[in-house]
Image: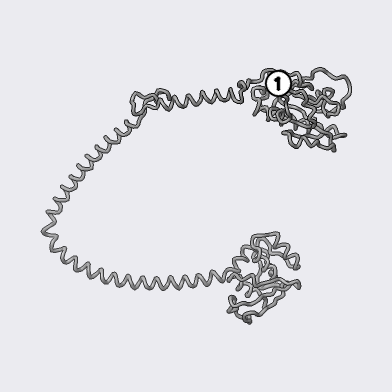
Amino acid sequence: MSGLPLLKHLNSRGLLSQCEATAEHKLKIKVTAAALPLPAGFTGGDGDVLEFDGQAATEYKGVESGKALQLLSIYFQLLHPAKFVPNLRACSAHDVEAVASGDKKALLAHMEEKIKSSSSKKSKSKDSKSKTDEKKQKKVKTSIQSKDITSALGKTKEKENGASASTETSSEFKFLDTVEIDAKRLAEDRATIGQNILNFEAPVATTDALLRSTDTSKDLSIALDYIKSLASNKRKSSSSSSGQPAKKQATGPPIIVIPNAMSSVITMHNAEAFFADATYTSNKGAKPKKVKCVRKLTKSRKNVEFEIIDDAKSLSPSEWNRVVSVIALGKEWQFKDWKNQDRTPMQPVDVFSRTFGFYISLEGAPVPENLKTWSVKFAKINRDNRGLDSVAHALFWNQLEAWMFVNKPEMCV
């Protein structure tokens, strides 16, 4: 006999922890008091250990596959009912075939049949007992009710002849009275509901007119004046914050500032090739005084002309308001003699808090330590493959456009 009935017995009692698959591909079962009594055909007491050939085929055959399942295959399926990978690993480690997916549902139902059958028997016995008790109680009740009905019928027949006429007339008058009372109540309810609706209705008017009601008990003009004062104070505070005038909207083409150093990857020599044509070239040839680049923004679908410079020392406050991006070199001396609007020295943190910072390096070059503390995005250019230049080009323009739509929306149209 295979160990399947005993395994089914332990599974029905939630005692699978007493089973263990050994290295010799056997199923070892330790009998405890909770497992007693064992199914028919198995002997053992508390503390005994029973072993079965785990690779041997059992008497249970798969519903879909029609194969006799091995004992360890069934054990691992019960152990991992919803986990495919652990079940497969365990079966392969013990050289047994895993239960097919079409057989799993029927197998799990078969291994739980014992619980359902025992519980159903108990429920059936309880139901049969309750039904017999109900039948007995009904018989007693019906016998009592029949006696009461016969006695009551005898009494009512005597009174029916004399009281039938009076009851008919009185019931007619009661019906007419209730109809009149209900009509009066309905009319009163309609009147009160209509008056309540009129009381809660408000005339069509502006917000200001509603708040400034002629009724002094409903006048909210004080609240209206208070809200207006808050709004005016907010405008004043925003315009005079930190003692500076209100920020003006930028007018003119957006400006991109690049490093004025030959050690920079992007200079005035190759700026137009990179920003306009997505191609990196060497810093050779004559240096142009100004570089302009037209870019079609993806969100607004507008062609925007950008001005590229490498000297930010002479920028006026209005021109600084047009600066949208600064290409970082990674050295603090890049910002020497750069001035704020109040002509105080401009620090790198100030620069990248008001502009979009970007750093471009050649692949494999070390990144300066200063850049780790600045708000700067990074891109690398391949030294040999020019086909990859478009990646750095797209990174710059996509991130700059997103920054401009948030911080400089007036320059996106």
Q: Work out which residue is located at the far left of the displayed protein and give it.
A: 162
Relative height, residue 220 to residue 81 (above, below): above
Residue 94's spot in the image, x, y percent? 75, 68
Relative height, residue 281 to residue 62 (above, below): above
Dot 1 amino acid type? Arg
Which of the 4 image quarters holds residue 330? top right
Q: Is residue 202 left or right of residue 28?
A: left
Q: Is residue 66 left or right of residue 269?
A: left
Question: Residue shown at 51%/70% (left/top)?
Answer: 119
Residue 87's spot in the image, x, y percent? 69, 63
**In this rendering, does residue 316 appear at all?**
yes
Residue 309's spot in the image, x, y percent? 78, 21
Number of on-image labels: 1
Residues 33 and 235: in front is: 235
Q: On the rendered image, what quadrant is the N terminus found in?
A: bottom right
Density class for disc 1 (Cα within 10 Å; few <14, some 14-19, many ≥20) is few
**In this rendering, does residue 303 appear at all?**
no
Q: Is residue 333 left or right of residue 296?
A: right
Q: Is residue 362 left or right of residue 354?
A: right
Dot 1 falls on a residue whose secondary structure is loop
Residues 180 and 412: in front is: 412
Q: On the rendered image, what quadrant is the C terminus found in?
A: top right
Residues 349 and 257: in front is: 349
Question: Residue shown at 58%/71% (left/top)?
Answer: 13
Colour pattern? one colour
Residue 189's spot in the image, x, y percent? 27, 38
Which of the 4 image quarters holds residue 257? top right
The residue to which callout 1 is attached is: 343
Which of the 4 image quarters holds residue 29? bottom right
Residues 373 and 123: in front is: 373
Relative height, residue 101 to residue 233 (above, below): below
